[in-house]
Amino acid sequence: MTPTDRGAGGGAGPEPELRWEATFPPDVSAVRRCRQEAAHALRGARVPPLVIDDAITVLGELAGNAVRHAGTEFGVVVVVGEGVLRLEVSDLDTRPPALLGLDSESTSGRGLHLVALIAGDWGWQTSESDAGVSGKRVWAELSLDAGRTGD
């Protein structure tokens, strides 16, 4: 499946400044493409560069986990509005994400620790499509104020 930019979405409440959605195959190269396309959309929405850097780091970890652990197609939603940038990555695996214990010998398992460090808040929820397919959505929120200087 190819990524699709749906532009500003409908729904109740104020319109987001940006709503970008895309679907990617379960391939490591898709994670890079996901980061690049999301960064392009965020630059177009005039998100501060430091926030974009943090968002792309978080998105890369969440998308990488979807490929590595779920091994399914993954969807991405990026919403910018009301001072917050929200990232969501969904896949077809219902197993919850887990913050692993780390030690100096660990060679992996740091991704969600980075997400927790960078994001103002993060979490996950199970999801079900209209077709009855189960999975999960992992989300993270970043403050848009983090990229402002000189206030």
Image: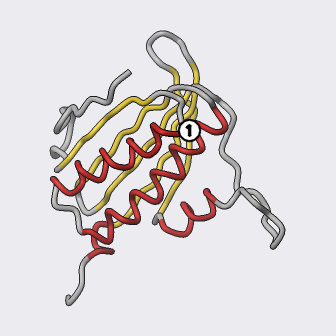
Q: Quadrant of residue 105?
A: bottom right
Which residue is painted at 47% across and 18% down in the image? Answer: 129
Q: Which residue is mark 1?
A: 125
Colour logic: secondary structure
Q: Residue at x 67, y 61 (%)?
A: 110
Residue at horizontal 36 percent and vertical 40 percent from the top: 77
Residue closer to the observer: 101 or 71: 71
- Horizontally, residue 56 falls left or right of residue 9, namely right
Image quadrant in which you'd find residue 12 = top left
- Pick the front one: 30 or 89: 30
Q: Position of residue 66 (x, y in %)?
A: 57, 38
Residue situated furthest bottom in the rendering? 150
Q: Quadrant of the N terminus?
A: top left
Residue closest to the eye, 25 or 95: 25
Residue type of the residue flagged with mark 1: Gln
Q: Please identify the quarter of the rendering in which residue 143 is found.
A: bottom left
Q: Secondary structure at mark 1?
A: strand
Closer to the camera, 73 or 142? 73
The quarter of the image holding the C terminus is: bottom left
Place of residue 55 in the rendered image (x, y in percent of width and height, measured from the top left): 39, 59
- Residue at (61, 57) in percent of width and height: 112
Vertical side of 69 occupied by 114: above or below: below
Name the residue at the front extreme. Answer: 29
